[in-house]
Image: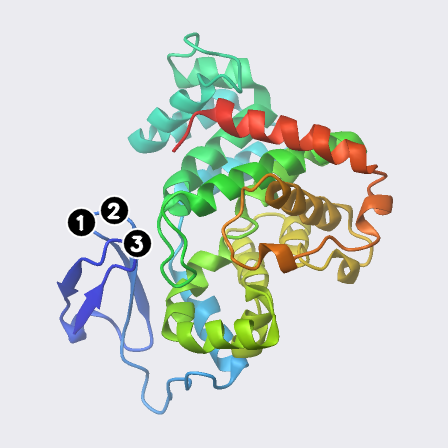
Amino acid sequence: MQVECSSCKTRYRVNDDSIPAGKAVRLACKTCKLPILIEGKPLKGEDEPPPNGDSATLKAKITKSIKDLPLIPQVVVEIQNQLSQMNVNMQQVAKMIETDPGITSKVLRIANSAYYGASGRTSTIMQACVILGLRGLSEVVILAGSEKVLSGKLPGYGYDAGDLWKHSLAVAFGSKILANLRDPGISSAAHTAGLLHDIGRIILDPYIGERKAQIREYMETRQKTFLDAEIEHFGFSHAEVAAEVCQAWKFPDFMSKAIHWHHNPGGSNGDLLSYILHMADHIALMGGVGYDDDDILNEVQKDAMSYLQLKQSDLSEILMKVMESVNQIGMS
């Protein structure tokens, strides 16, 4: 069979028998280094879902691929789990980071960015651990681990390289600022959840591409958002898929819940982090750090401002801080 990288369009010939039936394999594109999802033949008696067929079958298929094929380096997940423990051995964490040269170089680059204020002072991972502290290190590690994943093109959605990454950064910093106003104890988790809130779009992108014409027609004729189109055509949204990704990576359940409800925090039973992600997403779009043609149709929920105890004037101030943070981090 032939497979094509959705980002750079490089084509490869793959032996059908090399992919186990009923399984999927993710390989790195030799040209752009981004992952290519290659699916094996369906198991005997297992039918492929039709283009607009059973949403439960399609969701199960997508969820299975998530569990089998992590998108970020395993060391990043392991470090996040270590940093969430009560008694953290910083030397052990430093050694874990150093097992991955790519993550090591990125952690040092981010630690030396203007945002973290250690410019030129951090030359070793142990120094970064000491200077940044646990929360700062947790943020930097997840930034380093997700940068490549979130920076690629998403042709199904029509996003250029860097679109998703810049928006994700803006929502991460906005979420951290909002959390510090309401509950500083969840600021680090808010940052991570904000960074990963749209990662479900990466998983859905190939399926969006297969239905692009129908989705575009649905949006234009009915004045609907891309989120509406996802639910109409699949029976679920990228937010639900992103929540499944976080569960597969064993991030805390409250983060998965917030990501699931970030477009509709009113359905979260008053969950603070869900409202924080929702508002941070809105603030990023206010600043033009978005990527959809339908951004104008996305509105903040009526109770979000009062729930977060915000005034309209607060949003402008937060937006300025968000944009400054995105610029200071100095990443692609």
Q: Residues within 10 Å of mark 1 (few under 14, many from 20)?
A: few
Q: Position of residue 199 (x, y in %)?
A: 49, 53
Image mark for residue 30: 1
* Above or below for 199 versus 206: above
What's the amino acid at mark 1?
Answer: Lys
User: How many angstroms separate mark 3 from mark 1 (CA)?
Assistant: 10 Å
Residue that protrudes farthest toward the front in the picture: 221
* 163, 84: nearer the viewer: 163
State which quarter of the image contains the N terminus: bottom left
Name the colour scheme.
Answer: rainbow
Labelled pair 1, 2 in contact (Cβ < 8 Å): yes
Question: On the rendered structure, is 85 left or right of 6?
Answer: right
Image mark for residue 35: 3
* Above or below for 2 versus 189: below
User: How many angstroms separate mark 1 from mark 2 (CA)?
Assistant: 5 Å
Could one spot residue 88 in this view of the protein?
A: no
Question: On the rendered structure, is 192 left or right of 60?
Answer: right
Residue annotated with mark 2: 33
Residue at 71 percent across and 50 percent down: it is 274
In terms of secondary structure, where does tag 2 sit? Answer: loop
Residue at 34 percent across and 25 percent down: it is 105
User: How many angstroms separate mark 2 from mark 3 (CA)?
Assistant: 7 Å
What's the amino acid at mark 2?
Answer: Lys
What's the amino acid at mark 3?
Answer: Pro
Which quadrant holds residue 123? top left
* Above or below for 59 versus 67: below
